[in-house]
Image (cartoon, helix red, strand yellow):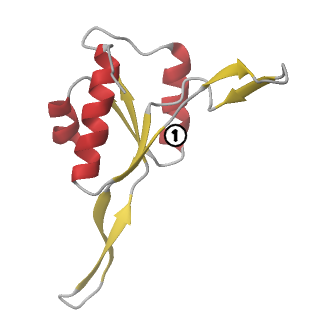
Amino acid sequence: MKHTTPEGQLQRLVLDWLAARHIFALRMNSGSLVNAAGRPVTFGLPGMADILAFPHNPVVLWKGISPYETIVDRFMPTWIELKAPKGKQSELQKSFQEKVESEGHRYLLIRSLDELEAQL
């Protein structure tokens, strides 16, 4: 599939980069359409980010009196919104960001692959 928009090209780069690092990621779609029976179908949530990824984040779960720590590899839900260099978040996207961050998820607004590498 050919991506002709700057965001579409960035999406392909980001998904390939995540896959190369064995980071589980899903492309999220939102919108609506009319099915073959003429019924409206909606999917996703308004303002939902473009990609949901689960990068590995080593976390110290317990640090006791002893010199030993318990470290686990935790998966942090990370929502990735992709924008062209001059693109701006809509109000719905800002609202979605607030919601997922209030649930303890990470939200990244990414304009380049370099930005993603720096933030992950």
How far across and how far down the image is residue 23, in percent?
31, 54
The residue at the point 47 percent across, 40 percent down is 101
- Up-down: is 117 above or below 58? above
| Nearer to the camera, 80 or 100 | 80
Number of callouts:
1
**Where on the picture, by quarter, is residue 3?**
top left
Residue 86 appears left or right of 95 = left
Q: In this view, does 91 lie to the left or right of 32?
A: left
- Residue occupying the far bottom of the picture: 66
80 in relation to 33, above or below: below
Residue shown at 70%/19% (left/top)?
A: 33
**Residue 21, picture quadrant:** bottom left
Question: Where does residue 114 sit, x and y in percent of width and height?
Answer: 14, 32
Q: In which quadrant of the rendered view does residue 84 lie? A: top left
* Quadrant location of the N terminus in the rendered image: top left
Task: Please provide percent x and percent y for residue 81.
Answer: 39, 28
* Mark 1 surroundings: few (<14), some (14-19) or many (≥20) residues within 10 A: some
* Residue 99 or residue 24, whichever sits in front: 24
Q: Position of residue 97 (x, y in %)?
A: 48, 31
Q: Examine the rendering and report whether any part of residue 120 can be seen.
A: no
Residue type, mark 1 in image:
Val
Residue 97 visible in the displayed image: yes
Is 1 or 61 nearer to us in this picture? 1
The answer to which of 9 and 38 lies nearer the viewer is 38
Q: What SS does tag 1 mark?
A: helix
Q: Which residue is drawn at 19% across and 32% down?
A: 113
User: Residue sitting at 31 percent across and 40 percent down?
Assistant: 15
Residue receiving disc 1: 100
